[in-house]
């Protein structure tokens, strides 16, 4: 009896040690960034490995909003993320409704082409994207970057929403049509409310993806006033500039809206993700 009790204590101790080590490696980088944001120094070499070991200052936050274009970068990123999310929801849901509810020639071929397009990573077409944006005047514009993100989002998300709409009973469509509803009214007032879980999931994922993307903004945007948060923040830690603490302060501010958004909408997100996964 005592041997079993001792074994249980040892097992619990080992489990606590393992989880403690894992928690340390997960939490320490986050605490280090928060500490760096309030550290008096500038470079990463001047920041103590002990969190808040160098003192406390808010000068980096003041520097961000008074001597850089951080507010402009934040607004540019917000515009791009919101426009990408709304455009993706509208185009993908309309396309999904057409593929789910209509029969037409080449329907299967078009669906297959969307699936094939999704196989290739976006980076494969970067040269073609650059040339197209150059020809249509989309380089160094926010709408050009939104166009890139929306075009990349449509194939997979159309498939995703279409498969969800296939599970919505067609008797709802027939009942609405008997009452005199047209296709757009059925789509907007019958299908979209029922498909709210997958639409919410689509809105969240298409909003967060471009928020801290670096590759495509680097290719499309050139002017300082058109830069996004990712480009602006990385300009603090180049090979010619080592302003890590300002970078940490900017990163911390970027995280705050996401934390607040998650706390406020966590119940709706869990319901949406679960509903999107188990809908039959």
Image (cartoon, grey):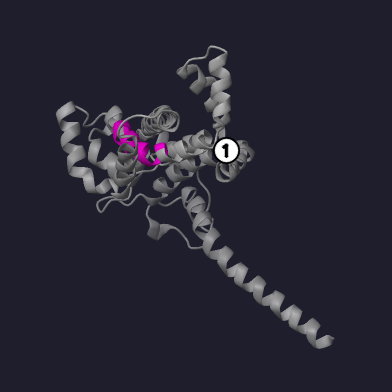
**Is 60 inside the magenta-drawn segment?**
no
Towards the viewer: 124 or 57? 124
Q: Residue at x 56, y 43 (%)?
A: 273
**Which image quadrant is residue 193 in?**
top right
Towards the viewer: 166 or 154? 166
Assign the magenta stretch its main secondary structure.
helix
Give above or below for 104 relative to 279: above
Q: In this rendering, does residue 63 appear at all? A: no
61 to the left or right of 261: left
The N terminus lies in quadrant? bottom right
For the record, the magenta segment spans 146-158
**Which image quadrant is residue 108 in?**
top left
Q: Residue at x 54, y 37 (%)?
A: 167
Give above or below for 173 relative to 46: above
Mark 1, other Cα within 10 Å: few <14 / some 14–19 / many ≥20 = few
Towards the viewer: 27 or 141? 141
Give above or below for 146 relative to 41: above
Residue 75, image x and y in percent? 40, 29
SS for callout 1? helix
116 to the left or right of 90: left
Towards the viewer: 258 or 183? 183
Q: Residue at x 65, y 77 (%)?
A: 14
Which residue does the numbered mark 1 point to in the structure image?
Answer: 260
């Amino acid at each position: 009896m005592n041997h079993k009790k001792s074994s249980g204590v040892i097992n619990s101790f080992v489990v606590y040690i393992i989880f403690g080590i894992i928690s340390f490696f997960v939490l320490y980088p986050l605490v280090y960034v928060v500490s760096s944001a309030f550290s008096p120094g500038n470079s990463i070499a001047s920041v103590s490995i002990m969190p808040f070991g160098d003192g406390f200052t808010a000068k980096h936050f003041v520097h961000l909003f008074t001597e850089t274009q951080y507010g402009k970068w934040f607004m540019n990123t917000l515009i791009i993320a919101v426009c990408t999310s709304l455009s993706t929801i509208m185009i993908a849901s309309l396309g999904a409704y057409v593929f789910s509810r209509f029969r037409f020639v080449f329907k299967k071929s078009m669906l297959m082409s969307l699936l094939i397009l999704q196989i290739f990573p976006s980076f494969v077409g970067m040269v073609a994207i650059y040339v197209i944006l150059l020809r249509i005047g989309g380089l160094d514009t926010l709408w050009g970057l939104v166009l890139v993100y929306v075009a990349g989002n449509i194939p997979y998300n159309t498939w995703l929403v279409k498969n969800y709409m296939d599970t919505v009973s067609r008797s709802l469509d027939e009942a609405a049509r008997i009452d005199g509803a047209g296709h757009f009214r059925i789509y907007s007032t019958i299908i979209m409310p029922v498909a709210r879980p997958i639409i919410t999931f689509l809105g969240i994922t298409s909003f967060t993806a471009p928020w801290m993307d670096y590759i495509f903004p680097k290719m499309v945007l050139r002017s300082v006033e058109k830069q996004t948060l990712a480009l602006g923040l990385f300009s603090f830690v180049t090979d010619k500039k080592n302003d890590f603490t300002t970078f940490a302060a900017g990163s911390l501010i970027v995280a705050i809206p996401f934390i607040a958004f998650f706390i406020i909408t966590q119940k709706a997100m869990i319901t949406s993700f679960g509903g999107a996964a188990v809908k039959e």
